[in-house]
Image (tube, rainbow, N blue to C red):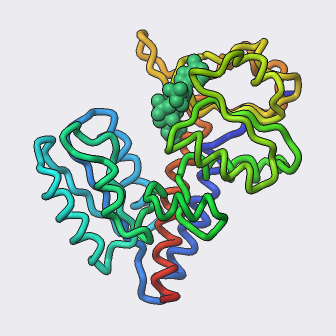
Amino acid sequence: MTRIMDGNKVSQDIRGEIKEKTAQLKGKGIIPGLAVVLVGDDPASQIYVKRKENACHEVGFYSREYKIPAETHEKDLLNLIGVLNADQKIHGILVQLPLPSHINSSLIIEAIDPQKDVDGFHPVNVGRLLTGQPCQMACTPKGIMVLLERYGISLAGKEAVIVGRSNIVGKPLFLMLLAQNATVTVCHTKTKDLAEVTCRADILIAAAGKAEIVRGDMVREGAVVIDVGINRLDNGKLAGDVSFAEVSPHCAFITPVPGGVGPMTIAMLLHNTLKAAEAGLEA
Ligand code: NAP
């Protein structure tokens, strides 16, 4: 029987755990603090930022939001990052992407103190992930790893296939799965026969950003299917990268969209911020 992997439930459990740890940390005089920087007024980004703020509030974090006009100069944003790096109340800095085209995103990410890089995008954290050192890990792939763990899905020796090789999902997920001894294949738009590769997967992760490209005949019987995609259809509804109707009858586990990977991403942002605050305690 197929099991639905309930990201809402698991993320709620994790938020509960973070809330408890936050209360303990407060007893030691530390309140985890997150600064969220939003440049411009992209509606989707505004929704994401609001969700992140609400989540911070729920677990007892201190949070500060900076809403900055789209025409802000790169150097002014860099100055703000410098101020937040030095701010003792702020343990995590999140700059909501995408940034307007006149701002170099890499430059902004590299300006963030790696310890405060709760998105795990700074090259120092990416390099540490690559070399197996402790680091801040990107929230979406980390959320997928935690979801797999909480559902008791072992990875050692398994064939894992990722569709998508972005810096924020596919590539870091590749490293995380490899570190857990899975045999990992990463597909992209130049992959010759996508279905041939996906059919090999014990664990299939779809992160292509293409509505329902993973069809029923592309998934092996009994596979674990993680759907990262969030695609807005013409009728306004959300769809994942996996055809849930076709795939769910013959896989062992599957994540829904919405309610699968999405809530885990926010839970991991909270986790990373708490971790940064705890690191301050050790320093
Ligand atoms: P992205 O930067 O656009 O990368 C998409 C990747 O998928 C690229 O590597 C691309 O290959 C590959 N791809 C696209 N079409 C393909 C196809 N037909 N066959 C094989 N590979 C294909 O996207 P992203 O930022 O990683 O996001 C992917 C999806 O996840 C989006 O729907 C996004 O909204 C969603 N997402 C969800 C969360 C969450 O919290 N749930 C977080 C982040 C992203 P090339 O490299 O060859 O172009």
Foreground of the two, 72 or 10 = 72
**Image location of residue 258, percent across then percent down:** 55, 31
Tell me: residue 264, above or below residue 248: below
Q: Residue at x 27, y 77 (%)?
A: 87
97 left or right, relative to 266 = left
Q: Nearer the viewer, residue 57 or 80?
A: 80
Q: Position of residue 186 (x, y in %)?
A: 67, 34
Residue 19: x %, y % from top left = 53, 68
Residue at image coords 19%, 51%: 67
155 or 148: nearer the viewer: 155
Work out whether residue 223 can be spotted: yes
Quadrant containing the N terminus is top right
Taking depth in this image into account, of 224 and 163 the one nearest to the observer is 163
Q: Residue placed at 58% from the left, 31% from the top?
A: 164
The answer to whether residue 17 is above or below residue 190 is: below
**Is residue 4 something one can see in this rendering?**
no
- On screen, residue 151 versus residue 279, left or right, reads right
